[in-house]
Image (spheres, rainbow, N blue to C red):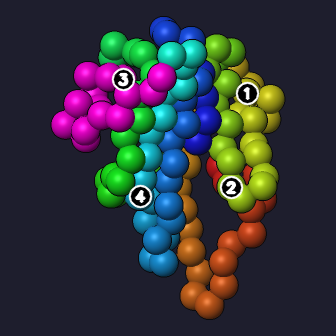
Amino acid sequence: LRYTHSIYKQDVIEVFEVNPTGVLILREVVFKGERPTSIVQLKDLEDYYMTGGPFMVGNLSLTVKGLNLRVGSIGRPTIVVGGNELDLYTTMGFGASVRVVIESTVGSLLAYNPVYLF
């Protein structure tokens, strides 16, 4: 997930993995900036989200049931899956409420198709 933080105007990347049972796992959070990126610990993640500044938290293993996103003109959240990008602002519009969940089927991997994501 890629977006711009609405208060600090920083580019943010949240990296998720989908495990074999279809569960989202947050693996990494990066707040980009012009100065060098600080590597922070998981216990400090919430504070850094609220204070801004470039930082990175890696080696995470936080299980997430789904993502609830509100689409805005500043944040412009974009979902990136493999080489495919889905700009939610362009696709869903300003103010849209989006819930991202993963569904799996036995014996096959669901194809990336924005029509069926929401």
How far apart are labels 2 and 1 at the CA level? Answer: 17 Å
User: To which residue does mark 1 refer?
Assistant: 89
The residue under the point 48% across, 34% down is 30
Residue type highlighted by circle 4: Ile
Q: Is residue 43 left or right of residue 3?
A: left
Which of the two discs, 1 and 4, sits closer to the camera? 4
How far apart are labels 2 and 4 at the CA level? Answer: 14 Å
Front residue of 29/24: it is: 29
User: To which residue does mark 4 refer?
Assistant: 25
Q: Quadrant of residue 65?
A: bottom left
Closer to the chain start, of discs 4 and 3, is: 4
Residue type highlighted by circle 1: Tyr
Highlighted range, magenta: 36-49
Residue type highlighted by circle 3: Tyr
Tell me the element at label 1. Answer: helix
The residue under the point 38% across, 47% down is 58
Where does residue 75 sit, x and y in percent of width and height? 61, 21
Residue 81 disc label: 2
